[in-house]
Image (cartoon, grey):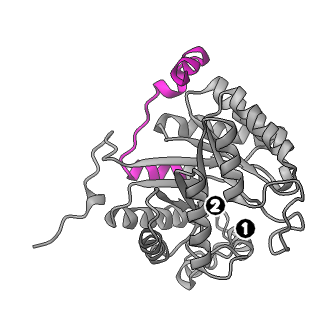
């Protein structure tokens, strides 16, 4: 008897217990801001659990991150999750950001240690008067405000870690400090995530470990990013994009197929939550979510800001 695949049972408009979240980064220019908000408007009707907004190294995008989060709160019914790092900053400075988010109505922070000031691959040194690491930052957030805290996880280990086991110990410390969700670094071999999840559960960590999915908008750009962050690129993936440098239309089709294949396989393995790294573009993410059975709820995009505020109180 053939066992039915869960991913085949997608009812139009039905979510089947599946949940998604989307990550954006704050824009650097008017053109990038337009692209960001076009993507947010496109994806908002899919009713994500939350949307996160990144925070540059050393707080380099602090004001732009805050402005983006505040606009999401004011103009949409989405729940924003503001990223926060503790690199090159005193506790007082970081605490001021936490209080600022809480006062603005933010109820979810993604707490990250952050990259060294010298860049990925450099040596990390805690600020003498700052938080020592991500677990310390999580504890600080929880002391200041009643805010949900998500953190990062690394199926292939953090580039600076000595081992996956050491990474899992750090994840446990973050959970003990109050984190209630982890989103993983992107990966392309699902076996890496599933094996990592087994090890995390064996360590007694029971929070959701949400797979981070990166639809490949630009293969060369993704490859450079993967090399800096320690994510592996399997040969089969490189082969799929080979020869398409001057063929953007086919690249987009291949990217959609790769992301869909990955997500559908994870659904067949029982995964129900996904975090998409959108790169501020909606098309590929929207297509994959459609395959997951998610359909627009246009009331999300049309509700006035006053109703948005009432929903969050």
Q: Residue at x 88, y 63 (%)?
A: 117
Q: Is residue 304 magenta?
A: yes
For residue 197, side relative to residue 149 (left or right): left
For residue 55, side relative to residue 163 (left or right): right
Q: Which residues lie in the magenta part? A: 285-313
Residue beneath label 1, please? 221
Task: Name the spot of residue 160 as percent of width and height, x first.
Answer: 73, 76
For residue 6, side relative to residue 250 (left or right): left
Q: Quadrant of the N terminus?
A: bottom left
Task: Name the spot of residue 257 as percent of width and height, x first.
Answer: 47, 65
Residue beneath label 2, please? 217
Look at the picture and state if 22 lies above or below 185: above
Is the C-beta separation of discs 1 and 2 under 8 Å? yes
Find the residue positioned furthest to the bottom: 235
Task: Name the spot of residue 296 as percent of width and height, x first.
Answer: 44, 35
Look at the picture and state if 123 lies above or below 266: below
Q: Residue at x 66, y 51 (%)?
A: 138
Task: Name the spot of residue 87 as percent of width and height, x first.
Answer: 83, 57
């Amino acid at each position: 008897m053939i066992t039915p695949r869960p991913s085949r049972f997608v009812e139009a408009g039905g979510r089947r217990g599946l949940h998604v979240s989307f990550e954006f980064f704050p824009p650097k220019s008017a053109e990038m801001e337009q692209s960001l908000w076009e993507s947010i408007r496109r994806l908002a009707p899919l009713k994500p659990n939350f949307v996160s907004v990144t925070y540059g190294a050393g707080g380099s995008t602090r004001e732009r991150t805050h402005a983006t989060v505040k606009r999401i709160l004011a103009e949409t019914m989405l729940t924003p999750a503001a990223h926060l790092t503790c690199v090159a900053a005193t506790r007082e400075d970081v605490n001021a950001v936490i209080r600022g988010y809480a006062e603005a109505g933010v109820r979810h922070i993604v707490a990250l240690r952050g990259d060294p000031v010298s860049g990925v691959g450099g040596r990390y040194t805690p600020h003498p008067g700052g938080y020592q690491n991500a677990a310390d930052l999580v504890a600080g957030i929880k002391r200041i405000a009643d805010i949900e805290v998500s953190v990062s996880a690394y199926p292939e280990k953090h580039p600076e870690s000595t081992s996956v086991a050491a990474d899992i110990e750090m994840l446990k410390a973050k959970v003990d400090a109050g984190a209630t969700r982890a989103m993983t670094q992107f990966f392309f071999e699902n076996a890496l995530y599933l094996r990592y999840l087994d090890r995390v559960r064996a360590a007694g960590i029971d929070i959701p470990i949400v797979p981070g999915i990166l639809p490949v908008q630009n293969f060369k750009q993704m490859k450079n990013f993967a090399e800096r962050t320690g994510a592996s690129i399997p040969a089969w993936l490189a082969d799929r994009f080979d020869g398409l440098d001057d063929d953007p239309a086919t690249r987009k089709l291949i990217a959609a197929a790769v992301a869909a294949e990955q997500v559908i396989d994870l659904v067949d393995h029982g995964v129900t939550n996904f975090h998409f790294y959108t790169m501020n573009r909606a098309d590929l993410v929207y297509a994959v979510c459609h395959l997951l059975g998610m359909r627009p709820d246009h009331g999300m995009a049309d509700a006035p800001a006053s109703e948005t505020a009432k929903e969050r109180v």
